């Protein structure tokens, strides 16, 4: 029954069936071609042995209702070729010729490759007037126009000539062989309306495995994807590799402008990332900080109501035992300092500078220094009563790195307000020395 269906499809619309046959894997092509070859041979033998017997004979295709989209009168009229010039009559061809043509077009289609992705996605662009004139001359006056083939070799372009010559006997002239303005609008997708969704998926798997990206019509909805990633990330301390992959995918999404995704998922993403900072696997912790940094860079305004929580969790990550995590925390803190509103950031950092232990206090002072570089003079004046006590305390810290960071923060303040800083340094040992001089001394130690 399946063989009868294949033969019927071949006889019903030979050009379309041949094109689809060429899109199938080679094993399928060989089987179908062998079947059709046997059918054509038996049909030819029956015709020769009994001229009056027409049961096994391939009927001539004169009816325009059965012509393929490529040979319809509408399409042909644009090129100046009449439908009769594009029809074929199997009475003039023996079975060997038809079989040879079938094999030839199958091989040509299989080996044929589109010149570029532009040929798939956009109409062909040619130079207007020059090509219009050349196209009209190719049809009206070309000496190589063969009425039996229904095409002009002069009009056909380069690598497509072999394919078009082989398909011409099967009534499938190349779309580019139609001259005139229509030729410039050729797009292969315009001829796929009659191919079902099932056939399109088969084409993806069979012919263009290496170029499957070209067939992706609509990307996966990021909102649904993020929901799946969050579900995976909720498996704390489990499925390490899967959660690594989820974080990497989330990192990619954060770099895209998907406002709808963050409107829906920002709070959940943030809380899960902050919770993931306590994961057992240090690579997971480092990845979470990198994702957090990217979100801060691309969606800074969304952190307004979560500034304190985000700052505290990021600073706590500085005491991690793995250097990879500490580096990621330092990068995230630096991005935080440049993303959150300066006044809000200072108010969160000041208590941490005064009360936290090393290395959290060191990280807070460094972050505060970066924030001060962004703040205006008037705003900084108002915040000095909150800032200075923590820096004076840091100047007396037992850790040299904390003392050095405190001095550099004072230098940053000095660069904004100048000598107006000195009245606030009465308790600072060595305050008679200018702040820039202190910074120079510490930079050499």
Image (cartoon, grey):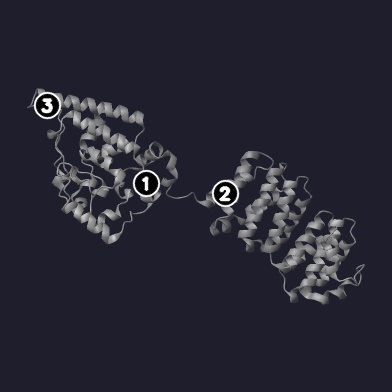
Mark 1–mark 3 CB contact (< 8 Å): no
For disc 1, the marked residue is 115
Q: Who comes first in sequence, dot 2 or dot 3?
A: 3
The mark that comes first in sequence, 1 or 2, is 1
Q: Nearer the viewer, residue 231 or 349?
A: 349
Mark linked to residue 227:
2
Q: Is residue 149 visible?
A: yes
Total count of labels: 3
* Residue at the extreme left of the image, as rendered: 52
Answer with left or right where residue 229 lies relative to residue 111.
right
Q: Count residues near mark 2 (Cα–Cα under 10 Å), then give few for <14, some for 14-19, many for 20+.
A: some
Instruction: Answer left or right for 358 relative to 135.
Output: right
Separation of disc 1 and disc 2 at Cα? 39 Å
Q: Nearer the viewer, residue 229 or 368?
A: 368
Q: With respect to residue 401, does 54 lie above or below?
A: above
* Position of the N terminus by quadrant: top left
Residue 355 visible at all: no
Mark 3 or mark 1, which is nearer the start of the sequence?
3
Q: Quadrant of the rendered structure where residue 180 is? A: bottom left
Compared with residue 436, is residue 277 higher up or lower down, i.e. above or below? above
**Which residue sits at x=33%, y=53%?**
124
Looking at this rendering, what residue extends furthest in the front direction?
143
Q: Is residue 111 left or right of residue 79?
A: right
Q: Residues within 10 Å of mark 1 (few under 14, many from 20)?
A: few
Residue carrying label 3: 47
Q: Which mark is residue 301?
A: none
- Label 2, secondary structure: give it: helix
Q: Position of residue 84 (x, y in %)?
A: 13, 45
Residue ID at (60%, 43%): 245
Q: Residue at x 72, y 73 (%)?
A: 376
């Amino acid at each position: 029954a399946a063989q009868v269906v294949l033969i019927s499809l071949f006889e019903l619309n030979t050009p379309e069936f041949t094109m689809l046959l060429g899109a199938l894997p080679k094993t399928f092509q060989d089987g179908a071609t062998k079947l059709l070859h046997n059918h054509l041979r038996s049909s030819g033998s029956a015709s020769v042995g009994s001229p009056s017997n027409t049961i096994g004979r391939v009927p001539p295709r004169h009816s325009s209702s059965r012509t393929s989209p490529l040979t319809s009168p509408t399409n042909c009229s644009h090129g100046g070729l009449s439908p009769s010039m594009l029809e074929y009559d199997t009475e003039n061809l023996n079975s060997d010729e038809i079989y040879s043509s079938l094999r030839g077009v199958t091989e040509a289609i299989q080996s044929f490759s589109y010149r570029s992705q532009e040929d798939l996605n956009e109409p062909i662009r040619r130079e207007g007037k020059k090509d219009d004139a050349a196209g009209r001359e190719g049809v009206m006056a070309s000496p190589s126009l063969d009425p039996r083939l229904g095409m002009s070799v002069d009009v056909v372009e380069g690598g497509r000539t072999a394919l078009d010559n082989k398909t011409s006997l099967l009534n499938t002239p190349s779309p580019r062989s139609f001259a005139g303005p229509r030729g410039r609008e050729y797009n292969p997708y315009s001829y796929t309306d009659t191919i079902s969704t099932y056939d399109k998926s088969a084409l993806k798997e069979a012919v263009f495995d290496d170029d499957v990206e070209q067939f992706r019509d609509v990307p996966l909805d990021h909102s649904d994807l993020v929901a799946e990633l969050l579900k995976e990330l909720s498996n704390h301390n489990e499925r390490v590799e899967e959660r690594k992959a989820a974080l990497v995918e989330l990192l990619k999404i954060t770099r895209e402008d998907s406002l709808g995704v963050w409107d829906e998922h920002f709070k959940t993403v943030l809380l899960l990332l902050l919770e993931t900072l306590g994961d057992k696997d240090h690579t997971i912790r480092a990845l979470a900080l990198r994702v957090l940094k990217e979100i801060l860079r691309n969606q800074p305004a969304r952190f307004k109501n979560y500034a304190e929580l985000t700052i505290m969790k990021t600073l706590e990550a500085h005491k991690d035992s793995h250097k990879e995590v500490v580096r990621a925390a330092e990068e995230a803190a630096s991005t935080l300092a440049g993303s959150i509103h300066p006044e809000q950031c200072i108010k969160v950092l000041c208590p941490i500078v005064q009360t936290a232990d090393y290395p959290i206090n060191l990280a807070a002072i460094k972050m505060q220094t970066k924030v001060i570089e962004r703040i205006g003079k008037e705003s900084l004046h108002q915040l000095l009563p909150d800032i200075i006590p923590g820096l004076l305390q840091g100047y007396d810290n037992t850790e040299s790195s904390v003392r050095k960071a405190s001095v550099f923060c004072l230098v940053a303040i000095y660069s904004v307000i100048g000598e107006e800083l000195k009245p606030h340094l009465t308790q600072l040992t060595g305050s008679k020395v200018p702040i820039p001089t202190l910074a120079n001394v510490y930079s050499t130690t």
